[in-house]
Amino acid sequence: MPQEMIRVGLVGVTGYTGMELARLLTGHPNMKLTAATSRTEAGKRLGDLYPFLNGLPGADVILIEPEPELIAKKCDLAFLAVPHTAATEMAAALVERGLKVVDLSADFRLKSAETYEQWYKVEHKRPDLLPEAVYGLPELYASDIAKARLVANPGCYPTSIILGMTAALADGLIETHGIVADSKSGVSGAGRSAKLGSLYCEVADSFKAYGIGTHRHTPEIEQELSRLAHGPMTISFNPHLVPMNRGILSTIYAQLKAPLSQADAQRVYEETWADSPWVRVLPSGQLPETRNVRGTMFCDMSVIVDPRTNRLIVVSVIDNVCRGASGQAIANANIMCGLPVTTGLMLCAMMP
């Protein structure tokens, strides 16, 4: 193996985020998948589990049980693509063995164990690691990510909303109360396990809201928006399920502090994101579509001033599986390993 290659492990390969990580790592010039785990599929060749990988790097990896000692021997860095609670002890075990860890679950996103327990209804087993876990939104925390042993990969809905609100909060354009985020997600956001509400006949030719006022991403969104606003914030977050595979579209409504022209709002957003490789502020009058970011790291957004209601409206779109999970995890790993954040991730949207 070339000396510059970073050996990476994938803990939990059978879900959509694990599948996407396997796909993206085939094209990474500095990372090599050397271990992948699954309790149910251990012993199988990864290319047999996912035939789309055959002929590409990683296809010949043999799945192993998720044992920290085995992973630590084979890897320098590990991605944890497992549900919340399952990642806690694995993250601790791998960090203690000297690995860098990017956790795609919710176990280390919230700084307060009490808040985690309130929303997730389980005890947090390793609150001692919460202070050092870095929230992995590269646009906001790259310098902290670069020094981290443990990165908490953001949720998909929070990524679209936090990026959408960053410029408005940083420039003090909006009131910090009364913000409403109305978000729509593709069905892959519900995970790959069999659930009645995710079956084709249940979601096709339909459109529904869910988790109104109770969705577990709410405290994560509020935590990060509060950091941007330098004060506590409460947000009304309202998710919906759309019958498509990938994508999130968030429409966010906030009250303006003072009259603001469309040109000034556009300028603030364009200046805020001028140096970002992945945030694309669309020209005034254009609105983003999920198809233009499918399979990519891009977050396309539009900012609209509605003088009649004195509102600032932001429409933000991402791919929930790539930008909202696996691609963002690789971006964090890039930073942790001293690579350019875009390494292996300058991807064009999958069309049509």
Image (tube, rainbow, N blue to C red):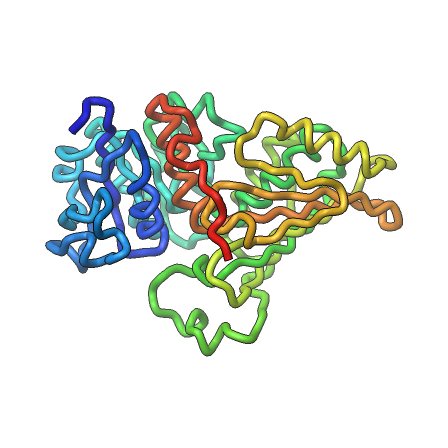
Circle count: 0
Q: Is residue 70 left or right of residue 293?
A: left
Compared with 171, 117 (above or below) is: below
Residue lying at the far bottom of the rendered structure: 201
Rendered position, 301 above or below 16: above
Q: Residue at x 42, y 37 (%)?
A: 345
Placement of the N terminus among the 4 image quadrants: top left
The residue sitting at 47% across, 51% down in the picture is: 350
Query: Residue 261 at what x, y percent from top left?
Result: 85, 36
For this view, does 284 lie left or right of residue 294? right
Q: Decide which of 124, 27 is in the foreground and name it.
A: 27
| Above or below for 241 versus 82 | below
Report x, y in % for residue 42: 14, 54
Q: Splitting the image into 4 quarters, where does residue 6 fall?
A: top left
Residue at the location (38% across, 35% down)? 344
Q: Quadrant of residue 95?
A: top left
